Image (cartoon, rainbow, N blue to C red):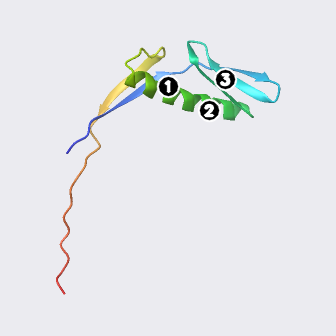
């Protein structure tokens, strides 16, 4: 059975500001998308994870994702097979 997947690539603009001990990352075009971290790199990693989760939620709820869609490709590279293996009788 072939399972179709769609690969979407979005543009995620991010602003990062230092706030005390933390770095706060926000997306200027998506108010629901924000995160914080102990380092700049950590804050960026966190907001990427938040964005991925929000995209899944928005798609499930059929909401408009406010990010620019850079590309969308259908992939037919995922397959499922049922394999039968015969072992020699002893």
Q: Disc 1 to disc 3, how far (Cα)?
A: 15 Å
Left or right of 71 on screen, residue 22: right
Give percent across and percent down for residue 35: 65, 26
Residue extending farthest right: 20
Task: Answer with the quarter of the image where residue 40 lies.
Answer: top right
The mark closer to the camera, 2 or 1, is 1
Q: Tell me the tag on residue 54.
A: 1
The one of 44 and 60 positioned closer to us in this rendering: 60
Bin the neighbour count of mark 3 within 10 Å (Cα to Cα): few under 14, some 14-19, many 20 and up. many
The mark closer to the camera, 1 or 3, is 1
Label 2: which residue?
46
Q: Disc 3 to disc 2, how far (Cα)?
A: 8 Å
Q: Are marks 1 and 3 in contact (CB under 8 Å)?
A: no
* Identity of the residue drawn at 20% across and 76% down: 87
86 lies above or below 47: below
Label 3: which residue?
25
Give percent across and percent down for residue 43: 67, 30
Left or right of 59 on screen, residue 47: right
Q: Disc 2 to disc 1, how far (Cα)?
A: 12 Å
Secondary structure of the residue carrying numbered label 1: helix
Query: Looking at the rendering, in which quadrant would you find the C terminus?
Result: bottom left
* Identity of the residue drawn at 47% across and 22% down: 10
The one of 77 and 62 positioned closer to us in this rendering: 62
Precedes in sequence: disc 1 or disc 3: 3
Task: Answer with the quarter of the image where residue 15 lies.
Answer: top right
Secondary structure of the residue carrying numbered label 2: helix
* Identity of the residue drawn at 64% across and 19% down: 26
């Amino acid at each position: 059975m072939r399972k179709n997947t769609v690969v979407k690539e979005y543009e995620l603009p991010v602003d990062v500001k230092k706030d005390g001990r933390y770095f706060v990352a926000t997306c200027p075009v998506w108010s629901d998308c924000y995160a914080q971290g102990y380092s700049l790199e950590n804050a960026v990693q966190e907001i990427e994870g938040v964005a991925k989760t929000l995209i899944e939620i928005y798609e499930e709820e059929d909401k408009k994702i406010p990010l620019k869609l850079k590309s969308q490709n259908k992939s037919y590279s995922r397959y499922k097979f049922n394999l039968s293996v015969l072992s020699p009788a002893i």
